[in-house]
Image (tube, rainbow, N blue to C red):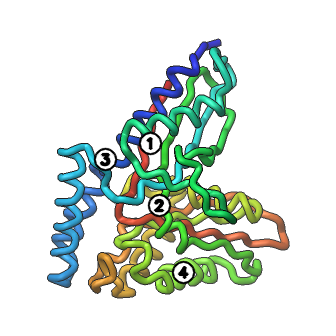
Amino acid sequence: MREIRTEQIVQAVRDLFIDANCNLGEDVLAAFDRAIETDESPVAREVLRELKENARIARDEQSPLCQDTGLAVLFVEVGQDVHVTGGDLKEALNEGVRRGYGEGYLRKSACHPFTRANTRDNTPAVIHFDIVPGERMRIVAVPKGGGAENMSRVDMLSPSAGLEGIKDFVVKRIEASGSNPCPPTVVGVGIGGTFERSAILAKKALTRRIGQRNADPELAGVEADVLSRINRLGIGPMGYGGNTTSLDVFFEVEPCHIASLPVAVNVQCHAMRHKETIL
């Protein structure tokens, strides 16, 4: 049995959201470099260089990559041999968000859906818990911006649509999104489970690193095929044209009901922000 104090959790979450908002991952920066070398459009290459410069300034000055610092999403894997002491786990996670967005001078975007009244501290966070073996706690912080999130969709396809129907749904969703999600995007696709589970799978897919293919060779091939199809759409960086509309596509798949085929597409902008820690 391992004891983890709530204050450790608060500090970890605080630091993760500040880090995620100010320091773009090396995998994303490397993807920019590859695209600068391969994109056929001079305008696209210039936009990608501007995005790299924006990331550099954010890192050097420790200021946010984007004014939209996101709704706070957390994936928390709790080892079954972990004992949280000193308070409530969920409240500790929210307090970490509260401190991170306050002390990090990050924009608070959480509001009531009807009145639009701001909660003033970016809580409550959207928290996904998973109980796993062991005596560790893994916390993944995902600040999720509104522009890309608004382009995301869930659909209940007919099982007869099959794999080709799934591919078509994903590509058409990105095509319809156009420049709205601030491409080049990263696309998370969740397939199976139930209506809500497919959406969670799609969101969780976005916590992978650029270039991290699915462990299933067949799915890895599907990811590469869909990415190629998306990049032939010609939307390009920030919608200015080119063959870098998306940096990567990630599929996560689970079994579903025999009468259903749930498919979710969760879109992430070029500021692919997620950081993690293990306590």
Q: Secondary structure at mark 1?
A: helix
Q: Whole-percent x and y of residue 10? A: 51, 28
- Camera-side mark, 3 or 1: 1
Q: Quadrant of residue 17?
A: top left
Q: Earlier in the sequence, mark 3 or mark 1?
A: 3
- Camera-side mark, 4 or 1: 1
Asked if labels 2 and 3 touch by Cβ distance under 8 angstroms, the answer is no
Q: Is residue 270 left or right of residue 51?
A: right
Mark 4 and mark 1: Cα distance apart in space: 32 Å
**Mark 2 closeness class: few <14, some 14–19, many ≥20 residues within 10 Å:** many
Mark 3 and mark 2: Cα distance apart in space: 14 Å
Q: Secondary structure at mark 2?
A: loop
Residue at 19 percent across and 63 percent down: it is 33
Question: Disc 4 marks which amino acid?
Answer: Arg
Judging by the rendered image, the residue that carries numbered circle 3 is: 22
Q: Earlier in the sequence, mark 4 or mark 1?
A: 1
Mark 3 and mark 1: Cα distance apart in space: 12 Å
Residue 66 visible to an observer of this rendering: yes
Residue at 69 percent across and 65 percent down: it is 114
**Mark 3 closeness class: few <14, some 14–19, many ≥20 residues within 10 Å:** many
The mark tally for this picture is: 4
- Check residue 173 in the rendering and tell me which mark sits there, or answer none: 4
- Camera-side mark, 4 or 2: 2
Q: Earlier in the sequence, mark 4 or mark 2?
A: 2
Judging by the rendered image, the residue that carries numbered circle 2 is: 145
Q: Is residue 4 above or below residue 138?
A: above
Q: Secondary structure at mark 3?
A: helix
